[in-house]
Image: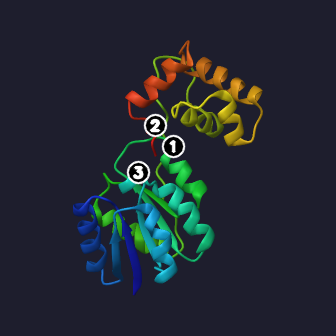
Amino acid sequence: MYNALIVDDHESMCDSLSYTLENTGEFTVLDKLSRADHAEAFCEKIRPDIILMDVCTGGEATGIDATKIIRKRFPDVKVIVMSGFDEITYAPRAREAGAHAFIFKSKSLAYFAQAAKGVMEGQTYYPETKTIPVPSGEAPLTERDMEVLRLMCRHMTSQDIANELFVSIGTVKYHKSKMLAKTGFEKSIDLVFYMVSKGWIKPEY
């Protein structure tokens, strides 16, 4: 029997996942939290075997940041990151944070149960890499392009982005110009507006 923790600020989703996992006969849900930044303290008290972690949780706490901390401090704890948003950076960022799986909430509850059991058996689950539909140009963008673009969407300056990514400001400007050429936009602000308005990037998480 595996001990599970569910982190999601939607009560109905927590209840559905809890019922589904426990109905397999292989999981006991220890608790349900509404904020990702409370998960670390929970792991210190009662270390679960697996955590199902939403990206966007209460208090604007992000499950990706929490996953990175938990995987570093508690390497034996398995983490499945999930999201109801079709955001293009979440899956690669979850993988980089050390998550064992990333699942969009549009998947069935049966798939969540299958993935949870598979992760406990050493498997990983990640969706296919998505490409961004743009008006014209040569998308897709590289992972580094996406890192720069995500920070641009948070209204960070080129110098701020360079400091965040530990690169030169010239490197940041190179990625910006490359992204404009790839996507067909003339100005960075137009590219940022397109990404945020279409829901491809949610800068707050």
- Rendered image quadrant of residue 112: bottom left
* Residue mark closest to the camera, 1 vs 3: 3
x 41%, y 71%: residue:
116
Residue occupied by mark 2: 201
Note whether residue 147 is visible. Answer: yes
Tell me the residue that label 3 is attached to.
Answer: 60
> Label 2 amino acid?
Ile
Where residue 46 sits in the image (x, y, percent)? 46, 83
- Residue displayed at 28% across by 63% down: 109
Comes first in the chain, label 2 or label 1: 1
Asked which quadrant contains residue 176, the reply is: top right
Extreme front residue here? 59
Q: Are marks 1 and 3 in contact (CB under 8 Å)?
A: no
Crowd tier of the residue under label 2, counting other residues whose Cα lies within 10 Å: few below 14, some 14–19, many 20 or above: many
Q: Is mark 2 in CB contact (under 8 Å) with mark 1?
A: yes
Q: Is residue 133 visible?
A: no
The percent coordinates of residue 67 (x first, y second) are 52, 62
Amino acid type indicated by mark 1: Thr
